[in-house]
Image: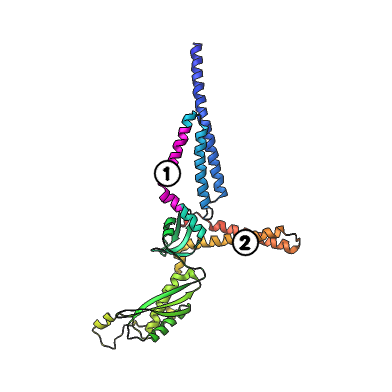
Amino acid sequence: MQAVAGGGYNAVMSVINEITQWLLPMAMVLLATGTALVLLRRLLPDEPETRVRRQITQLLMILVAFVVLALAVPLPSDTRGQLLSLFGLLLTGVLGLASTTFVSNAMAGFMLRSVASFKTGDFVRVGEHFGRVTETALLHTEIQSQDRDLITLPNLYLINQPVQVVRASGTLISAEVSLGYDVHRQRVRDALSAAAADAALNDAFVQIVGLGDFSISYRVSGFLEDVRAMVSKRSELHSKVLDQLHSAGIEIVSPSFMNQRPLTPEQVFIPKRDFAPEQVQDQVDAERLMFDKAALATRVEELKAQRAALAQELKALQESETDSDSNSYQQSWRERQIASIDELLNTLTVDPNEIR
């Protein structure tokens, strides 16, 4: 009986030792990996400028954890070698299959960052898509359209398509209109130039862009410094073109329409102005509604750049050998500015899902 009891005890202890040999290495590897991932989240927060490094580091840490786990568990040498070989084959196959998507988009993301043709807050047009850039990540770029919708574009698509970027220093706002040959071009040019002036555009000019069979195509353009109001200013220019042409007695109708109307020659198609100019309703700030996330992302980037400049100035003052009240005041002032910016960044930096 004692022999049987001793044999049962030894069997139980053998099973416990076997489980311990398996569970202990697995628990240690998982604990170390989890701790490293938590530290990584603190060192590299989920922000546009650190997102690429964070994603790559997370991927490498997970791959290393798999290899360490295979080496730590008590397996025979042959089995461990076969497991590592299988893992290598699976990793190679996954990378090979995903080379046209993941790897290609990742390489395209690195290329976009090296070229730096646009940044957060810029207006871009890619193919049929137009909007302001809200986020640039490793695999994709997000823009916000005029409908306030968020459009995710793969970086590979941006590399293969021409990207039109509106310069932050200003852009040209244009409007086109087709008028009949019976209207002298000088009258049209004067009216369109006045429309551009009413829209507060600088350096306006008028071009004849086409001579059709029945009409002449004119284009008026002017320089706009504040590109953030580009959408509203383009609409305003169109409205001023209508007002100036109608005020000048120039009809904006097609010749076929004019030839087919059963009306007297004295009849003109110009709407009557039966309201006072000061009674025009105030318009909503369209850009604020359209590009709210892009505006917030731009503001955050500007604050971070301002904070970096203040931190560099503060470091130079601290390393300076000058010990005076002026130096101390300058350091104190910059420290207060940095603290204010940090507080404002904590207020503005929210979860991107909340902005959606």
Residue drawn at x 35%, y 84% is 250
Q: Residue furthest bottom?
A: 266
Judge left or right: residue 316 versus residue 23: right
Residue drawn at x 45%, y 42% is 91
Judge left or right: residue 7 versus residue 272: right
Viewer-closest of 112 and 200: 112
Secondary structure of the residue carrying tag 1 is: helix
Within the image, what quadrant is residue 208 found in?
Answer: bottom left
Mark closer to the observer (1, 2): 1
In the picture, the disc for residue 309 is 2
Give the mark, 1 or 2, whose residue is nearer the N terminus: 1
Residue type, mark 1 in image: Val
Evaluate if marks 1 and 2 touch, with contact meaning CB atoms under 8 Å apart.
Answer: no
Q: Name the magenta segment's main secondary structure.
A: helix
Secondary structure of the residue carrying tag 2 is: helix
Viewer-closest of 145 and 55: 55
Judge left or right: residue 254 versus residue 59: left
Q: Label 1 crowding class (10 Å Cα cut-off): few <14, some 14-19, many 20+?
A: few
Residue type, mark 2 in image: Ala
Give the answer, above or below, for where 263 lies relative to 225.
below
Residue drawn at x 52%, y 49% is 54
The magenta stretch is 81-105
Res 192 seen here: yes
Q: Position of residue 60 (x, y in %)?
A: 51, 44
Q: Read off the residue under disc 1.
A: 94
Q: Position of residue 248 (x, y in %)?
A: 38, 86
Q: Quadrant of the C terminus?
A: bottom left
Within the image, what quadrant is residue 96 found in?
Answer: top left
Q: Is residue 95 magenta?
A: yes
Q: Position of residue 211 (x, y in %)?
A: 34, 80
